[in-house]
Image (spheres, helix red, strand yellow):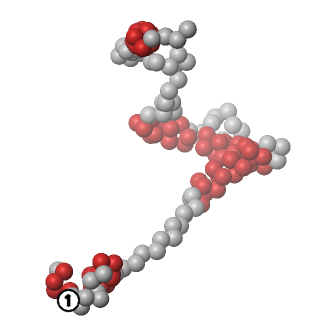
Amino acid sequence: MKKTLEEKQAEMKARNTRWKPGESGNPEGGGRPRLPLPKLAAPEVQRQLATVDEKDPRKRTNFERIVTAQIEIAKNWKAPNAASRAYECLMDRAFGKPVQQIDQKVTVTSREEDLEFLKEQLGLKDHGSSSESIQ
C-alpha cells in the first residue's frame, strides 16, 4: 500500500533529529582523524630522538636506531610494500623529495595583436575600420 504525502512527511520529520552540540551523527564515532602529535610537540620529539639509549651497547641515539630499523625494513625482500615505503622514506630524508616539474606554455601577445584578433573575430577587419574607432 502506498503512503500518502502527509505520511511520508511525518515519517521524515520523525527521523530528522538534530544533533546536540558535541554529539556525533556517526554511530562508530569515526570522522576525520586527529593529528598524531600537536605542532607544539616538535621540540620534545627532537629531544627524544637526540637522547642516547643507555641500554644500547653502541650508545646510539634513538634517531640512529630508527634509521637502522628503517634500513633493515628496506632490505626485507619478503615484504616488498613495507620495503618500498621504508626505502622511499630514507631517500626522501637523505636527498629530499624529487622536484616535480610542470610544463606550461605561456603565450605573450601585445595589445595590438589582441585588437587584430578581436577585429578578425568580429568581422571588422574587412570593413577597413581603424584601431582608433575600437579603442
Q: Quadrant of residue 134?
A: bottom left
Q: Is residue 61 above or below residue 122?
A: above
Q: Residue at x 67, y 33 (%)?
A: 55
Q: Nearer the viewer, residue 34 or 25?
A: 25
Q: Residue furthest bottom?
A: 128
User: Which residue bears the numbered disc 1?
Assistant: 130
Q: Residue at x 49, y 30 (%)?
A: 32
Q: Is residue 61 above or below residue 135?
A: above
Residue density around tag 1, few if under 14, some if 14–19, many if 20 or more, within 10 Å:
few
Instruction: Indicate left or right for 103 with 77 as reference.
Output: left
Q: Is residue 130 above or below residue 68?
A: below
Q: Quadrant of residue 106?
A: bottom left
Quarter occupied by the C terminus: bottom left
Q: Where's residue 38, x and y in %? A: 44, 34
| Residue 68 visible within the image | no
Residue type highlighted by circle 1: Ser
Q: Nearer the viewer, residue 85 or 60?
A: 85
Q: Where's residue 111, x and y in %? A: 26, 82
Instruction: Indicate left or right for 8 with 79 as reference.
Output: left
Instruction: Indicate left or right for 43 with 109 as reference.
Output: right
Instruction: Indicate left or right for 27 with 121 as reference.
Output: right
Q: Secondary structure under badge 1?
A: loop
Q: Residue at x 56, y 59 (%)?
A: 96
Q: Nearer the viewer, residue 55 or 33?
A: 33
Q: Report how many numbered discs are placed on residues in the image.
A: 1
Q: Residue at x 82, y 47 (%)?
A: 77
